[in-house]
Image (cartoon, rainbow, N blue to C red):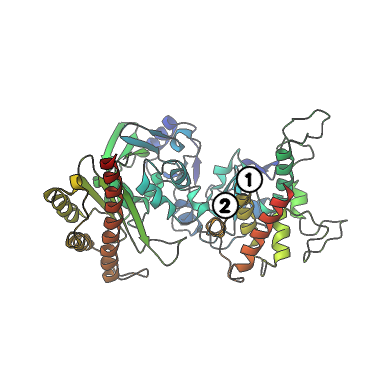
C-alpha cells in the first residue's frame, strides 16, 4: 500500500509498504532516515522515539498505515523543528513581508527538512562539520547540550533520548530531576549510567532559561 | 494482509462484521509487538485511529464514559479526580511513549492477566460497552475476563468505551516490579472504598489466570466496617481487621511460578499490598470524614 505523511515538515510518500510494517521500518528502510534506531521492536527501549502529531511515541509500535496523513518528526528534523518552535514562540514573521503567517510545514517554502538533507544530515556537503563538537552542524539546543555534557557514548540510544528530552523541555522548561527521569524512563541507555544524560538535559534546560 | 481504515464507528463495525477475524489496532502497543515478532499474521488489521470518538471521554453524574482509545496519558492528566485508581494504574503503564498510545480498550481487548488497568477497573466497578452491527451491550467488568488472554467479546464485536464508576471515596493501586517503568506486573492490587454504598471493592492482577476480585476479603471487610460502625465513626481500623483482610486477599490469588516471580511470592506480595492500601485509603477516608464532622 501507499502511505502519505509529513516527515520533518515535508510531505512524503512511501510506496509498496507492507500492511504489517511499522512506521520505524518505513522511516529507516523506505525514506532512508536511519536516525531513529531499531533495537527491541517491542516498545521497551525508546531508541525509535519520534513525534507523531507532536506526541512522543515508539515508531516501532505504530503501524505504517496509521501514520497516513499525520505529522512525524524524527531526530533528523530536530534542529529545524527547534528553529521553527523558536520562531513561533517569538511570533516572528514567516518569509513574507507581512507578519503573523504560520509556517507552512507541508509546503515547499524554506521550512521543514528536505528528505535529501535529512539523509545527509551527518556530513553536510560544503559545510565543515565536526561531529565531536557539533561545530558547523545544524543542531538543536538539546543536541548541542548532549555533546557538551558528554552524554553520548555508543550513541545508539541518543536519537530517542533527544526526541524525548526535546519534547519534555518544550512543555516543561524547568524540569526537576524527577521530571527528567520520568520523561526519559522509556529510553534505555546501556553505556552511560544516565548521569551524563541527566546533566545534558539540565544543561539544555538552563540554557533555554537563559535565552528567554 | 489487508489494512482496513474505517473513518467512522459504523464503518468499523461493518468491517468487523465482514471480517470477524480482523485484529483491531489502536495504540498498537500489544498488536505491533506480535506482528514485529512474527507471532501473529492476521489477514486483516482494523485500524481504529481514524474513529475520533474513541479518543474522547464524557464525565457523567455517576460514571465516566471512557472511549476505548483514550490514551493512558490522558487518563492521568484529565481524570485523576474522577478515576483516581485508574489514573494511578495508568501511571504504572510502561513509559511515556507507550502511555501516549495505549489505552484501556486495548488492555481489555488483550485481556492479559497482567494488564495494568484491570485491577483498577475491578475495584472501581465498570462496564464494557461492546458493539457489533447486531447491537450494543454492556458487559459487567466481573464477567468480562473469561480466561488467560480471553474475554467475553463476540468475534464481530468491538469495544467502544468503558463506563467506570466515578470515585466517591479513596482509591489506591500498586504494582510490584523490578523498576518504576517498563515493567510487566509481577502482581498488582487495586482497592476502592465506596462510602456511598458502604462497600469496598478490590482487584488483583497477575496473580490468577484472569484479573480477579478478592471477594471473600471484600465481604469480610464490609461486614467488619458495618458491625463496628466505622463508616460513621471514622475511627481507626483495628489492626486485626487489616491483617485478616490481607490474608483473605492473599487467599484469592491463584498464581503460577514464572520468570517474573514465584506463586508464593505473589501470594505474599498481594497480602502486603492489600494491607498497605487499606491503611492508606482508610486514613484518607477518616481524614475527609472527620474534617466534614468538624465543619
> Whole-percent x and y of residue B251?
19, 63
Q: Chain of mark 2?
A: A
> Whole-percent x and y of residue A100?
74, 30
- What residue does disc 2 label? A59
Q: Residue furthest right?
A: A126
Q: Residues within 10 Å of mark 2 (few under 14, many from 20)?
A: many
Q: Is residue B57 left or right of residue A87?
A: left
Q: Marks 1 and 2: CB-CB under 8 Å?
A: yes
Q: Residues within 10 Å of mark 1 (few under 14, many from 20)?
A: many
Tally of marks: 2
Q: Please, is residue A163 above or below residue A87 in the view? A: below
Find residue A162 and report its image quarter.
bottom right
Residue at the spot 44% in from the left edge and 41% down from the top edge = B69
Q: Give the CA separation, mark 1 to mark 2.
A: 10 Å
Q: At numbered mark 1, what does the secondary structure look like: helix, strand or loop?
A: strand
In the rendered image, residues at marks 1 and 2 fall on the same chain: yes
Q: For this rendering, which residue is in front, B250 or B53?
A: B250
Residue at the spot 51% in from the left edge and 47% down from the top edge = B100
- What residue does disc 1 label? A72
Q: Is residue B46 left or right of residue A205?
A: left
> Whole-percent x and y of residue B90?
42, 50
Q: Residue furthest front?
A: B294
Residue at the spot 45% in from the left edge and 51% down from the top edge = B31
Q: At numbered mark 2, what does the secondary structure look like: helix, strand or loop?
A: helix
Residue B208 seen in this snapshot: no
Q: Is residue A186 left or right of residue A173?
A: left
Quarter holding the C terminus of chain B is top left
Q: Chain of mark 1?
A: A
Residue B258 seen in this snapshot: yes
Mark 1 or mark 2, earlier in chain: 2
Amino acid at each position: 500500500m501507499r502511505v502519505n505523511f509529513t516527515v520533518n515538515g515535508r510531505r512524503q510518500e512511501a510506496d509498496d509498504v507492507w500492511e504489517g510494517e511499522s512506521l520505524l521500518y518505513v522511516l529507516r528502510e523506505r525514506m532512508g532516515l536511519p536516525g531513529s534506531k531499531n533495537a527491541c521492536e517491542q516498545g521497551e527501549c525508546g531508541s525509535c522515539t519520534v513525534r507523531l502529531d507532536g506526541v512522543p511515541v515508539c515508531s516501532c509500535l505504530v503501524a505504517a498505515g496509521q501514520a497516513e496523513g499525520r505529522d512525524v518528526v524524527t531526530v533528523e528534523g530536530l534542529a529545524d523543528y527547534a528553529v521553527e518552535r523558536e520562531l513561533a514562540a517569538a511570533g516572528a514573521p514567516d518569509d513574507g513581508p507581512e507578519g503573523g503567517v504560520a509556517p507552512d510545514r507541508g509546503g515547499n517554502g524554506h521550512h521543514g527538512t528536505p528528505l535529501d538533507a535529512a539523509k545527509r544530515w551527518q556530513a553536510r556537503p560544503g559545510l565543515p562539520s565536526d561531529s565531536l563538537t557539533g561545530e558547523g552542524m545544524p543542531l538543536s539546543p538539546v543536541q548541542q547540550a548532549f555533546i557538551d555534557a558528554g552524554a553520548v557514548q555508543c550513541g545508539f540510544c541518543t536519537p530517542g533520548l533527544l526526541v524525548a528530552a526535546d519534547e519534555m523541555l518544550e512543555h516543561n522548561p524547568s524540569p526537576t530531576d524527577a521530571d527528567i527521569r520520568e520523561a526519559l524512563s522509556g529510553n534505555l541507555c546501556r553505556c552511560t549510567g544516565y548521569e551524563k544524560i541527566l546533566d545534558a538535559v539540565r544543561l539544555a534546560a538552563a540554557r533555554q532559561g537563559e535565552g528567554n | 494482509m489487508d489494512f482496513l481504515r474505517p473513518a467512522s464507528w459504523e464503518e468499523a463495525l461493518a468491517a468487523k462484521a465482514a471480517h470477524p477475524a480482523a485484529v483491531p489496532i489502536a495504540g498498537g502497543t500489544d498488536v505491533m509487538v506480535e506482528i514485529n515478532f512474527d507471532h501473529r499474521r492476521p489477514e486483516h488489521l482494523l485500524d481504529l485511529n481514524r474513529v475520533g470518538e474513541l479518543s474522547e471521554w464524557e464525565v457523567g453524574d455517576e460514571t465516566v464514559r471512557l472511549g476505548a482509545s483514550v490514551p493512558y496519558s490522558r487518563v492521568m492528566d484529565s481524570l485523576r479526580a474522577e478515576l483516581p485508581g485508574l489514573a494511578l494504574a495508568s501511571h504504572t503503564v510502561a513509559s511515556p511513549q507507550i502511555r501516549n498510545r495505549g489505552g484501556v480498550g486495548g488492555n481489555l481487548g488483550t485481556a492479559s492477566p497482567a494488564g495494568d488497568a484491570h485491577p483498577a477497573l475491578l475495584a472501581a466497578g465498570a462496564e464494557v460497552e461492546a458493539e457489533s452491527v447486531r447491537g450494543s451491550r454492556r458487559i459487567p467488568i466481573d464477567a468480562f475476563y473469561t480466561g488467560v488472554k480471553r474475554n467475553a467479546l463476540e468475534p464481530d464485536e468491538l469495544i467502544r468505551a468503558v463506563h467506570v464508576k466515578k470515585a466517591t471515596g479513596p482509591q489506591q493501586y500498586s504494582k510490584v516490579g523490578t523498576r518504576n517503568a517498563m515493567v510487566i506486573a509481577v502482581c498488582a492490587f487495586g482497592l476502592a472504598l465506596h462510602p456511598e454504598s458502604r462497600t469496598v471493592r478490590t482487584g488483583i492482577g497477575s496473580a490468577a489466570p484472569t484479573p480477579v476480585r478478592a471477594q471473600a476479603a471484600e465481604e469480610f471487610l464490609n461486614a467488619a466496617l458495618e458491625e463496628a460502625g466505622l463508616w460513621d465513626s471514622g475511627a481507626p481500623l483495628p489492626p486485626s481487621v487489616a491483617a485478616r483482610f490481607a490474608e483473605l486477599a492473599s487467599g484469592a490469588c491463584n498464581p503460577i511460578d514464572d520468570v517474573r516471580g514465584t506463586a508464593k511470592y505473589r501470594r505474599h506480595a498481594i497480602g502486603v499490598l492489600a494491607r498497605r492500601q487499606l491503611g492508606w485509603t482508610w486514613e484518607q477516608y477518616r481524614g475527609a470524614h472527620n474534617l466534614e464532622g468538624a465543619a
